[in-house]
Image: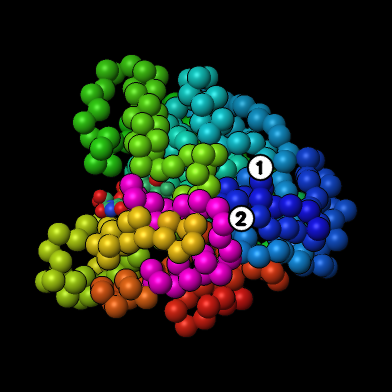
Amino acid sequence: MLPLQSRHTFALPVMARDIIEISKAEQLTEVDFNIPFMILGEGSNTVFLNDYSGLVISMRNKGIEKTQDDEFIYLNVAAGENWHELVCSTLADGILGLENLALIPGSVGATPVQNIGAYGVEVKQLIEYVKGYNINQKRFYTLSNEQCEFSYRESIFKGQLKQKFVITEVGFKFKKSWRAELSYGPLKKILLTGNNKEDAKKIFHQVVAIREEKLPDPKKIPNAGSFFKNPIILEPKLQKIIKEYPKIPHYPVGLNSQNIKAFKLAAGWLIEQANFKGFRIAGIEVNPKQALVLLNHGNSTGEDITNMILSIQQTIKDKFSVDLEHEVRIIDTDGECKITLNHSCFKG
Ligand code: EPU
């Protein structure tokens, strides 16, 4: 058994049966995928509840290649590169577009999986393609942006290709005619100078400042970022909730398949309204500064986390009739599972 504590930012002191590090994509052709396995980047969105009985495949390949034409700059980036370092190096190099996504922990290869997003930008807007290894077909190929089926915190890699495809490289495409994205509240007050490089840096510094204030650095206090997804509900339910909670933050996200208006709610607001800020189960605490984040102060078990998740889900269900889904990937002894009020650890 090998330790996993330093390999996931939630840092529970658990073990894995085996760990293999991939520093060159071709190594994947030699891996025995017939035993239980899971793919790991920097572990910033993954929580291991207990000792994992399978093989952890840790993506560590490196490399960035740049090309350009009149209109665009293109980067082909290896999955094992660190995301924030990529954001910093692109900005330093005058490649603009990733500034709103600064300081998100994790590896480049993990970003398409959950289509990371923050402060008005989702990574799908910058991704041109994703390359990887299909485990069943035993071959490398490339998916176009469209084939990745991106949506809010979702992609084909969490759906049809889950456990079937290992992301090895991500292709990014940056428009040379950059435009600032300032729609997110706290960025609105940024005054642009007209010098694109300077303006992108201003956004970068503002995003870093907001994140540092609200979101704890996992190196100092272990955490896994937003623990729950912001739930999407339909207009009739929203109207009922608004009657009781007129101040509830809600954002239109289009129409569902029956043409009913859908809205995104702020899970952090719901959790705060239910008085969870600072609430603890053993060493697991709801972040007093941003209720969507759970902190691990140590001396806690997977059971404590499960109980925390269920307790938040139950309270939000009772108070607002809204189901909260955890956003982090939860791994139990025999693989990934989903914790819901109906199943305390649902596999599949
Ligand atoms: N809010 C509260 N109380 C809280 C937290 C939030 O009232 O404790 C309210 C805020 O006042 C605001 C709204 O909820 O009106 C949204 O809050 P915030 O802007 O902090 O963002 P979020 O919805 O909680 C999402 C992402 C974050 C991303 C931020 C900024 C998800 C699951 N989370 O959080 O992503 O950084 O927006 O764009 O979509 C992550 O995924 O790990 C992550 C940190």
The answer to which quarter of the image holds residue 277 is: bottom left
Where in the figure is residue 222, as x and y percent of width and height?
A: 53, 47
Task: Find the distance from the CA under tag 2 to the CA under tag 1.
Answer: 24 Å
Is 287 inside the magenta-drawn segment?
A: yes
Residue nearest the viewer, comparing 263 with 127: 263
Residue 41 makes an appearance in the image: no
State the scheme by which the image is colored.
Answer: rainbow
At label 2, which amino acid type do we have? Leu
Please name the residue shown 64% across and 68% down the image: 332
Residue 101 makes an appearance in the image: yes
Where in the figure is residue 118, as x and y percent of width and height?
A: 39, 44
The answer to which quarter of the image holds residue 23 is: top right
**What numbered label is drawn on residue 79?**
1
Q: Is residue 171 above or below residue 269?
A: above
Where in the figure is residue 128, as x and y percent of width and height?
A: 55, 43
Q: Residue furthest right?
A: 30
Please name the residue shown 24% across and 62% down the image: 273
Label 2: which residue?
Answer: 12
Task: Tell me the magenta residue range.
Answer: 286-313
The answer to which quarter of the image holds residue 38 is: bottom right
